[in-house]
Amino acid sequence: MTPDQLIAAARAAATNAHAPYSRFAVGAAALLADGTVVTGANVENASYGLSLCAETVAVSTASAAGRLADIVGVAVVGGMMDHTGAAHGTDPIRPCGRCRQVLNEAAQMGGRDLTVWCGGITGGQVEEHRLSDLLPHAFGPADLCLTIARA
Ligand code: THU
C-alpha cells in the first residue's frame, strides 16, 4: 500500500461524505499494520455541532472491528462540493485538532507514532507528517497514570 494508494482510498471514501451544510467533503483512510485499509467520511448533522469528521469515523470504524491499536497511518483529503455534489481541490487538508487527539489514542494504543498523509481531493501534492509533529505534547494515557498492556 503506497501513500498514493491510501490517498486514492481516502478520495473514494469522500464520495460518501454527508456534508449538506458545509458542502465540504472529507475522506480518510486508515492503514493497519497488516495492510488493511479502513475508511471514513464526514457525517454532518442538522444539529451542526454533532457532525463527525472523516478521520474520527475511520478511527471509530477500525476500533469497532477491534483494530484501534493496529493503525499505523492515515490519509486525509477534502474539498468543496459543487452543485452536482462532486468535490474539488488540490490543496492538502490537515486533520482538525479534535481528530489529531482521536488519532493520538490509536497511536498510544499501538505504541507507535502515526504517519499522516494529507492531500487534495482531486490532485496536488501529498504531504507526509508525523502525528507527533501535528500534535506535540499530547495528552494521553500516561497523564492518567495508565500503562498500556500489549500482547
Ligand atoms: N472535517 C473533517 O471531516 N475532518 C477534518 O479534519 C476537518 C473538518 C469536516 C467537518 C465538517 O463536516 C466539514 O469538514 C467542514 O468543517
Image (cartoon, helix red, strand yellow):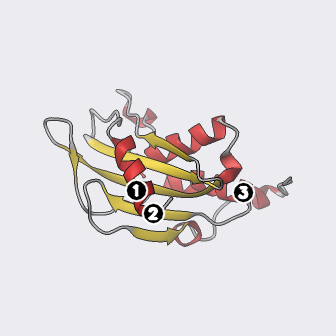
Say left or right for 106 vs 25: right
User: Which residue is found at the position 51% from the left and 58% from the top?
Assistant: 1
**In the displayed structure, would residue 145 be above or below residue 46?**
below
**In the image, what residue type sits under mark 3?**
Gly
Please name the residue shown 31% across and 69% down the image. 125
**Mark 2, residue position:** 3
| Real-space CA distance between mark 1 and mark 2, rounded to the nearest whole angstrom | 6 Å
Q: Are there few (<14), some (14-19), or many (20+) residues within 10 Å of tag 2?
A: some
Q: Which residue is mark 1?
A: 7
Which one is closest to the eye, mark 3 or mark 1? 1
Q: Amino acid at mark 1?
A: Ile
| Tag shown at residue 110 | 3
Q: Amino acid at mark 2?
A: Pro
Q: Mark 1 falls on what kind of element?
A: helix
The numbered mark, 3 or 1, whose residue comes first in the sequence reads 1
Q: From where the camera sits, is residue 58 visible?
A: yes
**In the rendered image, the vertical position of residue 124 relative to residue 97, given as above or below:** below
* Lateral position of residue 48 relative to residue 33, left or right: left
Q: Are marks 1 and 2 in contact (CB under 8 Å)?
A: yes
Q: Is residue 20 left or right of residue 141?
A: left
Q: Earlier in the sequence, mark 3 or mark 2?
A: 2
Observer able to see residue 140: no
Name, please, the residue furthest toward the left.
83
Residue 108, image quadrant: bottom right
Residue 73 badge: none
> Is there a contact, CB below 8 Å, between mark 3 and mark 2?
no
